[in-house]
Amino acid sequence: MNGGDPISRRPAWRSIAAAWELARLDRREAAPSGWIAATVPGAVQLDWARARGLPDAAIGQNVRLYEGLEDYHWLYRTRVPRARLAAGEQLVFACGGVDYACEVRVAGRLAFRHEGLFTPFEIDVSDCPPGAELDVLILPAPKLPGAPPDRTQASRVCKPPVSYGWDWHPRLIPLGLWAAAGFIARPRAHLRHVDFAYTLSGDLSEAAITVAAEAAGGDAQPRWRLLDARGSTVAESASAPVSLRGPRLWWTHDHGEPSLYTLEVTCGGDIYRRRVGFRRVRLVMPEGGWKHPSGFPMSRSHPPVTVELNGRVIFAKGSNWVNADIFPGAITADTLRPLLRLARDANFNVLRSWGGAIVNPDAFFDQCDELGLLVWQEFPLACNCYPDDPAYLRILDQESRSIIRRVRQHPCLGLWGGGNELFNAWSGMTDQSLPIRLLNRNCYDLDPGTPFLPTSPVDGMGHGDYRFRDERGREVFEIFQRARFTAYSEFGCPGPSPAAYLKTFIPEAELWPPRPGTSWQTHHGFEAWEADPTSWLCTATLEHYFGPSGDLDSLVDRGTWLQCVGLQAIFEEARRQKPGCAMALNWCFNEPWPSVAGPCIVNWPARPKPAYHAVRLACRPVLASARFAKFQWRSGETFAAEIWLLNDSADDLPAGELEVTLAAGGRSTRLLLWAHPPVAAGRNLAGPGVEAVLPPVSADAFELSLKASPRTEWSSTYRLSLLPETA
């Protein structure tokens, strides 16, 4: 647990299993009774549900049965094990994280007080008699007095606010030992913390490596070595910096190989191993960015948000990552693996780890290292006005330093963010707020080579919209074609979950028709977001285009159609706007529990919605693309589109041909055969326009097809709504 590192990095350490039990206390001083078995890592709500036979919180409206459990004190108990310690070993109780505050007693005596999810701690119990009780008293969830039952209750603490209720997360506030907690036998002379740091030369041909190893309990001098992928030592030292010539660089998977090395540090009998990598990430001004604004009076230019990786500007395509489960203690490497592979396979290169949620365990970053996914990591602040209060700042300082020291070791870390939507009217913070200044200082002190943004969005970035059609009747096509932002770090388009999936958690009696006040509302189908009372089903929008839905399948099919078309349009439009626009990240990738509808593209736990596949195609490194004005057309109307070739790759594209056809009612018409010239790496090519009068056919849709030759994998298809001619 040293510095938050998994014990798997410590081959000389032995984990000793701890048997945990749990008691709910009506008040702090109450004598414990009614002990139940506890699982660690986990959450008190999960243990209580197992013991009391509570039904699955994810089904129907069962989540209501979990209300109020966060307002109790909870007592975890285990016993100091009878451990056979070798000469020079010690026994420690190590805790990787508590949600959210606790007191630890050993043999009845107070040994430690703690607050914060992300700071590990340990207690030496070598001299404690075997069988002595070790108690961890979990305090009730912090809630701001007088605040309504929403995220504002978490506006004075460092507990992630999402569990206090969001438009895609139920109000269920976990408590407990959410990270590994137990006993470890290890050498008294051991490595307390290891920091791997390096500076790359201007041409990236050499890395000056420094390894700072903090040792405890002995006089042994730490030594380190660096091994390449074949296991050969490429650098080693005791203390002095070492230069490595020709380091293999870590790239996002779409621009190269995410090359990794193994760092091994030894100190006496202790050994520490982890994977590391070399990369340089910068935020730079876009091409022509300094020209705006022009003329006087003049304000400052927008801050840079264009990602430069290893000297190459890359277009950041990706998504917003939220908790993979409503119970952080239930998230494992196996939970994360299918989700992160889906993210890579969607042609994403960036994940924004959203500030309202947890900072993920090391398994998340380990897998992003492997998969070549760059991570924009925000601190756990979101949509609140966090105070300049010394008590709050003290815990924020502690938590942020723990987060930085742990995460900075990962080559996938691309960007630090202060938090989500802190400079907006509903938050009311500014860059002069002390929490922002503290986070900036800590990132500079502990990880100066990684860029820092105070929040998202900053000036020039765009968040929203999250609907296919807004209250003014504007569709995503109009909204984004008229927009000009340096980055679209949040945008969305809701869609219902597949019918087969809905049947797994909506009771049959409630399944049709969807109604407020039922499980449809509990799972975010109605009144989830204040901008639309029918969100996230958005039934008013569906009826605008299609009329009332007669059954579940038709409702799902219609909503899915809009989500697919909408997200495809936004991703492609953002890409067309480069270099002025540098980033497109949809809201959101995943979800922490089953939702009936919403902007996510992957249902919990890791089930892609149809929109996932539309996004995957829209994010291909190279594709033929069409820009058109709207979704729904009429027979007899003149359809018009601009044709583009989009290239986000590092390769020049050869000349080729692009055939554009329009198909409706079984009839297909060629509109264009475009012999396009070569396209430079990382550049787009605007082509000719096409027009066609839509035929009077008995069909509810038509397709626009862009067939590329000889690279057919660049081809694209758009399915749009077709209405009959008006009388």
Image: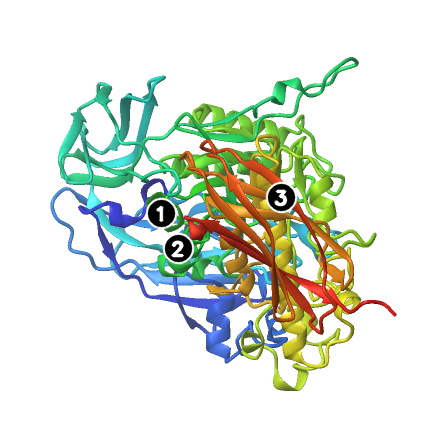
Image quadrant in which the C terminus is located: bottom right
Kindly give the residue lying farthest to the bottom in the view shown. Answer: 509
Q: Residue at x 32, y 24 (%)?
A: 198
Cβ atoms under marks 2 and 1 closer than 8 Å = yes
- The residue at which mark 3 appears reads as 573
Give the CA distance from mark 3 to mark 1: 27 Å
Question: Upstream in the sequence, badge 3 or badge 2?
Answer: 2
Q: Amino acid at mark 3?
A: Glu
Q: Residue at x 49, y 52 (%)?
A: 715
- Label 2, secondary structure: give it: helix
Against 31, is 276 above or below?
above
Q: Which mark, residue 341?
A: 2
Q: Amino acid at mark 2?
A: Arg
Depth check: give the residue in front, 575 or 166: 575
Question: Upstream in the sequence, badge 3 or badge 1?
Answer: 1
Q: Which mark, residue 371?
A: 1
Q: Position of residue 545 (x, y in %)?
A: 76, 66
